[in-house]
Image: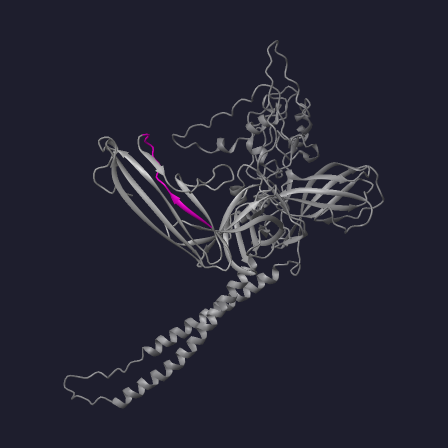
Amino acid sequence: MVYAQGALCRRLARGSVPPDGRVRITGLPRTLDPGSLRARVLGASGVRVTEARVEIEAEPLGPDTRASEGLRHEVERLRDAYAAAAERRDRQQKLIAEVSGLRPVPPGRKREDPHRRTPVDAWLELADFVDERLTGLHARLAELEEALVQAEHELSVAADRLDRASTDAASTHVETTVSAVLTLVGTADAEVETTTETEPGSESGTGSGVEVELEYGVPGAVWVPAYRLTHRQGDGTGRLVLRASVAQRTGEDWTGVRIALATADLRRRTDLPKLRSIRIGRRQAAPAPSGWREPPAGLADLFTGYAGAGPRPVRVRAPGAAASADAPPVAGGGGFMSDPVPPPPPAPQGYGAAPSPELPVPGSAYGSSPEAFRRAAPDVARSGPAQPGGRPRGGGMPFAGAPAPAAMAPMAPGAAAAPPPPPPPPGPPQPSGDELDYAALLLSGPEEQAARRGRLFPASSFDAVAVEYRRRAEAVAGLPLPGHAVRPRESAGSFDHRFDAAARADVPSDGTWHTVTVGEIPVGLRTEYLCVPSVEPTVYATLVLSNATDQALLAGPVEVTVDDDFLLTAALPTLAPGGVRRVGLGPAEGIRVTRRTNLHESTAGLRNNVTVLDHRVHVELANGLARPATVEVRERVPVSSESDVRIEERADWTTPPEGAGSEQHAPGTRVWRVDLPAGGTAALDGGYEIRIPAGKALVGGNRRS
């Protein structure tokens, strides 16, 4: 299901349930949103899903296992070839400049020496030599420039192919495998054989067994509608084929999948708000939070002996070993060394010992809830496992009792002291969803910070690589739209629509537009001709489309084919269910229109205090086509905002209908509808009078128009 931005994918896994009930489904995209993973068992098999989580693994790849490796090598080879061709061209240009600089230089003459005769033959021979040499050099330069242009063209083509290559395969030397680990409860068999499918209705699989449907959301998929209209002149119906231009960079190729298109926003929240009740009466204690329990008393005393033993010895690296970014500095000499860290804090005297001022410990006011702990020690919550000796990685805080980095550094003159952390909010703690996910909690060991030892913390959910993958995937939202294309959210308005493709399609993950045929939509169709002779004496052919289905037709480009001949590509406006719209086909040369006007000014009233402007309009139509034609002629009469300025019409024209689903017209628009036979003519006469009182009349200026 491709939404206005993003997609919701479904896969099917068939097989038998292993004894432990854990099934791993691999092959998921790297851009998968872990919070959107859903799994359910299809059919009444007596098996249900009790847990579903995402696991990410990485493993190195061989040099020949990457799909884009050949393209990358080809681009590098062509880049080297282009550089070599450019260098040859530059050398040739320098050689031409050197030969062009050859000039005869006469020898120096003293004042007492007589004048010498100029060796004209030598000058001419040098000129002939230079001309002959330059002719050959310029011919070679033309060949080198042509080779350089060819190399540049091949390089640009190869680079474009590499940029448009599918992101389904790994582009680096490390392959990241995203898997969905499911826990099934129910009837179990001896072994499991699972195959992932892209559609629940697929027939491939392992025969009878458990069918599990996996659903997940991915960013990086967009679509815009497009149409193809086939019409035969004289026929009241046509074939309107809905096609969609789909682009996706989700990290997996959609091969042989059923595609549905929706105009909804996948990122829009659909959960209902929680309304808190307000009660009047005796105050009651707040209920205890579900799933949260205070840490046991005396938890810090469990690691007293470990902290008192001092830092762990660190083995010196062997000579020539690669340095690690996380390895501590090593002094020269000796097989072991101690990490230079502050001394461990003194062991507390008992369960009620005073805690360290740097970090909260269990049982303190800051340690009563996860939120308060993170506010008190933000660096600890973000740091990884501690290095030997208690120094945390990633710039974390040291052991409790050790001086903080800010305290050890001298304060700059005039610098203000950091404000103390805000006090925790009153009431019971409110653990988040990550803190209540017990299977993902990790128990901090003795090497962690003093405030984290022996406590459960959620694993870090921040994945910079996943964020980068999603950022690249969402870049498809900035693709240039095809001609006359409109975003579905802009054309759908306040309603959402869904369109299901009739057949399977292939959409690779290359970030370019691919055309997918959705289906045929029956529409009412008739040909009419439209002209506004007061603006332009030209008749335009139009197709009047009426939507009799229960789905809206979104705005987009439509390729019009009349009598099996391609006519043009026009812009189709949004056509609501039951609505009628026009699609312009360009000027109709077979129908001519002529307009003549006449104005007569007079006075009326008891004292001739009313100016009467009598406008006469005469329109002639001539049908030169070999078939009947319906022509709509539009005129416009003035509209007055003054009650004493009257406008009287004298014509058989009509006012166009207004309302939902009708075409918008300017105020004062009037319409003639004329049915012209083949080769026939028609004359239309109309007019209106404008009665202006003397007090409203204009003095000077153009009062006639």
* Residue lying furthest front: 606
Single out the residue that lies furthest toward the right.
Answer: 190
For the image shown, how many numbered marks are present on the structure? 0
- Would residue 480 be visible to someone looking at this image? no
Q: What is the quadrant of the C terminus in the image?
A: top left
In which quadrant will I find the N terminus? top right
* Residue 71, magenta (yes or no): no
Q: Give the extent of the magenta segment.
A: 631-643
Q: Farthest left residue?
A: 112
Taking depth in this image into account, of 407 and 525 the one nearest to the observer is: 525
The residue depicted at 41 percent of the width and 71 percent of the height is: 90
Q: Which residue is nearer to you in this view: 423 or 139?
A: 139
User: In this view of the protein, which residue sits in the foreground, 678 or 264?
Assistant: 678
Q: Would you say residue 632 sits in the magenta stretch? A: yes
What residue sits 59% from the left and 31% below the top? 399
- Examine the rendering and report whether any part of residue 353 can be seen: yes
**Measured from the top left, where is residue 703 in percent x and y?**
26, 41
Whether residue 222 sits left or right of residue 103 in the image: it is right
Q: Is residue 65 left or right of residue 49?
A: left
Image position, residue 377 (x, y; %): 56, 30
Q: Quadrant of residue 396?
A: top right
Quick check: 154 above or below 654?
Answer: below
